[in-house]
Amino acid sequence: MSTREHRRTKIVCTIGPATRSVERMCELIEAGADVFRLNFSHGSEEEHAQTVAFAREAAKRTGKEVGLLGDLPGPKLRLAEIEGGLVELDEGSQVTITTEEVMGTAEVLPVTWEGLPEAVKPGGEVYLADGRIRLTVEETDATRVRCRVEVGGPIASHQGLNLPGADVGLPSAGREDLEWVDFAVRQGIDLLAVSFVRRVEDLEPVERRIRTSGSDIPVIAKIEKPQAAENAESIAQAATSGIMVARGDLGIELPLAQVPNVQRRLLAIAGKHSRPSITATQMLASMVSSPRPTRAEVSDVANAIYQGTDAVMLSEETAVGEYPVEAVQVMDQIARATEPELPYGEWVFTRAASDNDVAASVARAAVGSTYTLGLKALVVPTTSGRTARLVSAHRPKVPVVAVSPRIETVRRLNLLFGVRCVHAENATSLTDLIDDCAKHALDTGVAQSGDLIGITAGLPGMELGTNLFEIHRVP
């Protein structure tokens, strides 16, 4: 068995011009990618449909299923088209942001929101390109905002604007977002991330659209606004499929010094409610143009893992970077070096709350038994993936093999810490179920003949969720 299978932390890779080919995606998978992210803020439906086809072919060639995460644009202010796709803003220069339909230049930048001039005031700040470019507002009129460039740099078409402190007032999921939801359903996307969530209600339009389409794509709430950080407890409870700590916009909307504490709190909340978590943005940003990360970046990735993240995400590193495969390899190496130091035994009882929930209590008991009984592995038959999520939340140190008859579930479970996924048919009886689990433990190499394993699942007809925990000796 490949040692690569032993890594517990999952790696999400954003696909872009640097990696949009079957061959490149195969390299990413072999380097350790578990989930591919499709950023719907950039690219057409045709391009993303091609990416989906490439990803499925790469999974077929490598023999490893990968999840596909569609990232909705959300209510973010964005630039319109810029001449040549890219311009340079020089420090000290003047630039006008306009709501008029013009081609962007270094002197005039068009935006897609008519309310911008009313949302800013002279002396206010406007950030572009994930905060790398800072403008100061000098004057406004009905359609234009004249600014001075305080910190310059390159700016590209469709990049976002941030107005710290301003109430943009855009809908949580506009027409464009819902059209992308329809696209995701048609293409069989495995997971959907909802951008710029501020409160629980912001998830409802997307979830309703998914249900109306007859799909059950899980929804992940992106936490990137101060309001979301304040409402994180209720958002995490509602977003059963997880949260993403999107530190790029958080670091603009909040004082930078607060971001590490917010990240730690958000990951703790996700753990408490047994929700998967993704830590994202600029984790290995220097590797966009360098084959090696900085020491600070290595520490940043390790800290997210120490704090309990399920997955770490690469954005521009794999979308447009010069070293996308190397970035995944570095992420893989950091995770492997960090994971042996995690407080697994402590997390069994302190990380996720069981309350009076039968399924959560059974999951905790199963993980605890790996220590008291010396179990070699846990095997989790699951249809929806919920049992695997609850087991993963308690962070077992032993391997967890999730077995599902649904290929969609197998792909989605690639996001869960420590969980390996197997696609197999449903057992027809409890005896067959246990025998099949033992066989999967042998086939995946997590146990040998004579070893004790734990099997936890939900028996149908009792409406209790996960309600079975069986100790079994592998024949």
Image: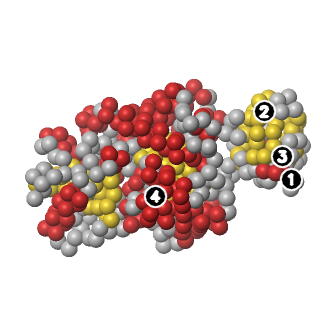
Q: Residue at x 16, y 69 (%)?
A: 432
Q: Secondary structure at mark 3?
A: strand
Residue position marked by numbered label 1 in the rendering: 103
Residue 156 visible to the viewer: yes
Amino acid, disc 3: Leu
Dot 1 and dot 4 residues touching (CB under 8 Å)? no
Query: How dense is the environment of label 2, judged by Cα within 10 Å: few (below 14), some, or many (20 and up)?
Result: some
Image-based side of 54 in relation to 434, left or right = right
Residue position marked by numbered label 2 in the rendering: 152
Q: Residue at x 45, y 48 (%)?
A: 31
Mark 3 and mark 2: Cα distance apart in space: 14 Å
- From what the image shows, is residue 107 above or below residue 420? above
Residue position marked by numbered label 3 in the rendering: 109
Q: Position of residue 50 (x, y in %)?
A: 60, 66
Which sits earlier in the primary sequence, circle 4 or circle 3?
A: 4
Q: Residue at x 81, y 43 (%)?
A: 87
Mark 1 and mark 3: Cα distance apart in space: 8 Å
Which sits earlier in the primary sequence, circle 1 or circle 2?
A: 1
Amino acid, disc 4: Gly
Amino acid, disc 1: Met
Which sits earlier in the primary sequence, circle 2 or circle 4?
A: 4
Dot 3 and dot 2 residues touching (CB under 8 Å)? no
The circle drawn on residue 67 is: 4
